[in-house]
Amino acid sequence: MKAGIVGLPNVGKSTLFNCLSNAKAQSANFPFCTIEPNIGVVNVPDPRIEKLEELVKPERVQMATVDIVDIAGLVKGASKGEGLGNQFLGNIRECNAIIHVLRCFDNDNIVHVDGNVNPIRDKETIDIELQLKDLETVEKRLEKVNRAAKTGNKEAQTEKALLDRIRESLLQAKSARTITPQGNDEEILMESFQLITAKPVLYVCNVDEDSAVNGNKYVDQVRELVKDEDAEVIILSVGAEADITELESYEERQVFLEDMGLQEPGASVLIRAAYKLLKQQTYFTAGVKEVRAWTINIGATAPQAAGVIHTDFEKGFIRAEVISYEDFVHYGSEAKAKEAGKFKVEGKEYIVKDGDVMHFRFNV
């Protein structure tokens, strides 16, 4: 599962990517600095794994990760191939969620591709290009399905009805994510269309350092604009975050954050938000060899969770032994949680909860 960072050229995408991944993607003050998409595997900050490490004292610790993709800046006309349009749209289609970076700071030394700072216009530029590309996809699909629908084919009629609703929405400059699939058949169809604007999105307002805590007038404009989108808005001073990553020690970073009025780096907040946007959650295994966070889809069953460790665990699944994170921490160890009756044995139907500490029994 990948989250793609998108936005106009020069809004801070590559600098943000560097902060998130500690990879050093080239970042410079001109458009199209990023041509090939850079992919960073990013640890998901989670204080729970630090607590488990403290209690279990394992030989090693492995955090959950999320893949972040830095994609080339998009410009007006991208849906028709302007700039790096076709490449951009292909790269974003392969991502599962969108992190949309908007420039919300004034700085005459950093060129804006459209001449002045206006995050509302910038958002609409990106939205329109993505909607136009999706409209092209929908209309091509409708051409094929219309013929079958006229013959009375029920599946084709279901698909045509959904495509017509999406097309109408796109023509009104509304993204495909505003369409709610009716029933399982439409959910499966919606997934198969691979529409760019159906992907979940969160907005990152890139602000100056003084606005990192409370935002500014540009952030207020963005919040007002997206209030009906059911999308999270995160305030981040990407320049300051870049400075924080350059500091050597934890203590230096904490002093920097305190001076800014922050409790943790904004990058940490963003990574957790991206993880949530991808509908991911975490379960733990905790032993003296290793404490590890495992990533699963929300709603995964115990066998599916076991399969993340190894496919044999899923094939030969017998049972899962489960202690909630809260109980594990409250009693201080697996043994004491068991003594207190907080150890559960679950079967194939068990839906794993975020934070479960698990062992699996299997037979191959």
Image (spheres, rainbow, N blue to C red):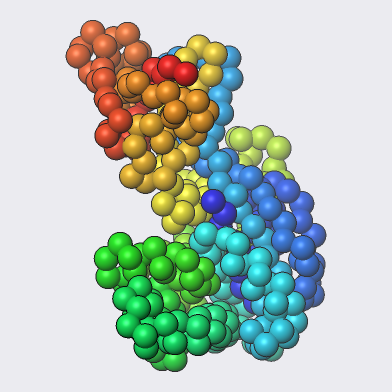
Residue 257 seen in the current view: no
Q: How many marks?
A: 0
Side of 330 where 51 appears, left or right: right
Side of 59 where 322 appears, left or right: left
Between 363 and 227, the residue placed more toward the observer is 363
Residue 218 seen in the current view: yes
Residue 60 drawn at (x, y percent):
58, 20
Residue 266 drawn at (x, y percent):
53, 53
Between 256 and 364, the residue placed more toward the observer is 364
Residue 188 drawn at (x, y percent):
39, 63
Between 364 and 214, the residue placed more toward the observer is 364
Side of 345 where 287 appears, left or right: right
Q: Residue at x 41, y 52 (%)?
A: 279
Placement of 38 over or under 108, stated as above or below: above
Q: Residue at x 35, y 78 (%)?
A: 153
Placement of 300 over or under 112, stated as above or below: above
Q: Residue at x 44, y 91 (%)?
A: 171
Residue 317 drawn at (x, y percent):
39, 24
Side of 251 where 333 appears, left or right: left
